[in-house]
Amino acid sequence: MNAAKKILILIMVLVFLGGLAYALYPTVNGVILTTSAEYVAEVFLNKTEIVQALTPTITDTGIPVETEVPYKDLLDAMEAYNEEIYREEQADLCDAWAYQEPSFDLTEYGIEDGVIGVISIPKLDIEMPIYLGATYDNMAKGAAHLSQTSLPIGGENTNCVIAGHRGWNGADYFRYIDRLEPGDTVTITNLWAELTYTVSETKIIDPNDVDEILILDGKDLLTLLTCHPYGSGGQHRLVVYCEQLF
């Protein structure tokens, strides 16, 4: 075989391998992203088990055990934040920057990875870390809390809005949340508790329709938010409303 044929065969092999790599990239990259998100979520859940074991419980007499709540400064700050945005009627929930700016610098509270909780959706086999602020980087790594909405600790007069990509570089993330139906459950695990919400309704809204994600008096709500339809580049938003009953 002459040199010209060898070069031609080499070029054909390289072209084939390049095409194969291009075709497989979304699948392989999706597996990497999903595995990474699930690992971060598991690390948080393991830490949460330790924290919750140290959190004061109520004795048979109804008197709290006298021990210090772990991360108490952060919990107090989160509760104060939720009360403030409710009192001010979420006046700053007005633009994309408001969504993106993290509510807290978690490193000040000893949390270096930026994870504030984990969202689990059994029906869709989803377990993702929750980051503060719907920034590009946070959305690429998992789910993100929209700033100027209630933080994921539950309570009356709260509506925690969690955003996720409807597919991202091969990872599904929130791609299939349109399959959720009333009665399905979604769990938020923070450092101190596990909160279970029940899906009540889904809706399609415009991207800037802020009124559809506001706190409702007397309710403990969780709202999931993603782009719609799939692959549209964000033409609309799919919203899944969930409620925790007291």
Image (cartoon, rainbow, N blue to C red):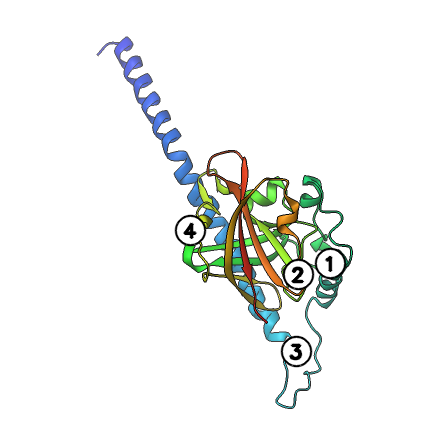
Tell me the distance, in whole angstroms, between the alpha carbons under discs 3 and 1: 27 Å
- Locate the N terminus by quadrant: top left
**Of pointers 4 and 1, the one earlier in the residue sequence:** 1
Residue at 70% from the left image edge and 49% from the top image edge:
102
Q: Which mark is residue 158?
A: 2
Q: Along the line of sight, which residue is nearer the eye, 203 or 138?
A: 203
Tell me the distance, in whole angstroms, between the alpha carbons under discs 1 and 2: 7 Å
**Of pointers 1 and 2, the one earlier in the residue sequence:** 1
Residue type at the position of mark 2 = Thr
Q: Along the line of sight, which residue is nearer the eye, 71 or 15?
A: 71
Q: Is residue 30 left or right of residue 88?
A: left
Residue type at the position of mark 3 = Pro
Circle 3 crowding by C-alpha within 10 Å: few under 14, some 14–19, many from 20: some
**Of pointers 4 and 3, the one earlier in the residue sequence:** 3
Contact between marks 3 and 2 (CB within 8 A): the answer is no
Circle 2 crowding by C-alpha within 10 Å: few under 14, some 14–19, many from 20: many
Residue 209 image offset from top left, x and y in percent: 63, 43
Q: Which residue is mark 3?
A: 56
Q: Which mark is residue 86?
A: 1
Residue type at the position of mark 1 = Tyr
Circle 1 crowding by C-alpha within 10 Å: few under 14, some 14–19, many from 20: many
**Is residue 164 visible in this depiction of the protein?**
no
Contact between marks 4 and 1 (CB within 8 A): the answer is no
